[in-house]
Image: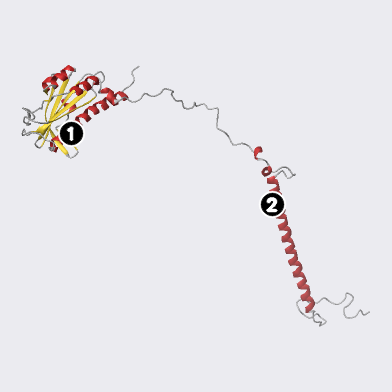
Amino acid sequence: MSFGQGGPYGPPPQDPFGSRDPQGQTPDWAALADASAQRARRRRWMLIGGGALATAAVAAIVATAVVTMNGDGGGGERASDKNSSDLPAPPGPATDSADPGPSFSDAVPLPPPNPKDFISTEDKDTAPLSADTLFPGPKLTMGDRVYAKGPTNRTTNCAGATQGALGSILAANTCDQVIRATYTRGGTAVTVGVAVFSTETQALKAKKEASGGLASLSGSGVPTFCRGGTICRKTTNSVGRYVYFTVGGFTNGKDVVKGDQEVFDTGDDVAEFTFLQIRRRGEAQASAAATAPVED
């Protein structure tokens, strides 16, 4: 029995590598190319489809996480949708503290002592008083002018340190003492004298009634000046319970006239220095009183 050229099982398979079959037939190269292209397209679409599915799965996971974070996932109210009144209030200051707050005294502090009070009455003016405390050092410097300090003197015989009517005026107002010092510069000399009283009232009265003048103080290299009728320049002033006088002129005995500026400058400098010394005396005592401990 003959079944033709292929035998009972149909024609023999084709050689995919291009070899001829035993019967000598040539393979269909066009069909093989189409089949290969179809297989390549199927693989490409499978890869694209798999990537899209993976991307969709990741997006679904992210969306689920966002919903979970913003709400309860069941349509509940989100935290961002709440009113500000529903949010917890910031913590306030602690009211129950174990430490007490600062306390302040209701007492009004006393005003600082007035320096003038300490040089206006002997009851408060208790600091040491002498020629050395009023006129310290060997010289006096005022600006660019330097004066040498000459002799000094302290006496309780107030009239003995004056000339003319001034002695009786000081005595009538109960003068306690007179302290004097002489300063020289070139050919000029000035003696300053401080008359001390118990109260400011007595000092002001003596200043108002003052007449005559202070007796110049010579010695220690300073010749006699402003004596025997020589015309000299005199000043009178007061502060607190102190009245201070000056008498100034030339050491050669020449009369002083208005144009003798060096005599006026010397007298003004010495008078100003004396005023400052008395004022510093009051300031020092007021400062000491302000810092002194309070007695029980």
Where is residue 81 shown, x and y percent of the image?
68, 43
The residue lying at 68 percent from left, 45 percent from top is 70
Secondary element type, mark 1: helix
Name the foreground residue: 204 vs 220. Answer: 204
The residue lying at 75 percent from left, 69 percent from top is 41
The residue lying at 67 percent from left, 44 percent from top is 80
Give the quarter of the image for residue 155: top left
Where is residue 135 shown, x and y percent of the image?
17, 29
Where is residue 126 shown, x and y percent of the image?
23, 20
In this view, the residue farthest toward the right is 1
Q: Taking 141 as reference, is 7 above or below it?
A: below
Q: Looking at the figure, which quarter contains the C terminus?
A: top left
Q: Tell me, for residue 62, which label it has, or none.
A: 2
Image marks 2 and 1: residues in contact by CB distance under 8 Å: no
Neighbours of disc 1 within 10 Å: few (<14), some (14-19), many (20+): some
Taking the image as shown, residue 17 lies to the left or right of residue 263, namely right
* Disc 1: which residue: 268
Taking the image as shown, residue 22 lies to the left or right of residue 287, namely right
Give the quarter of the image for residue 204: top left
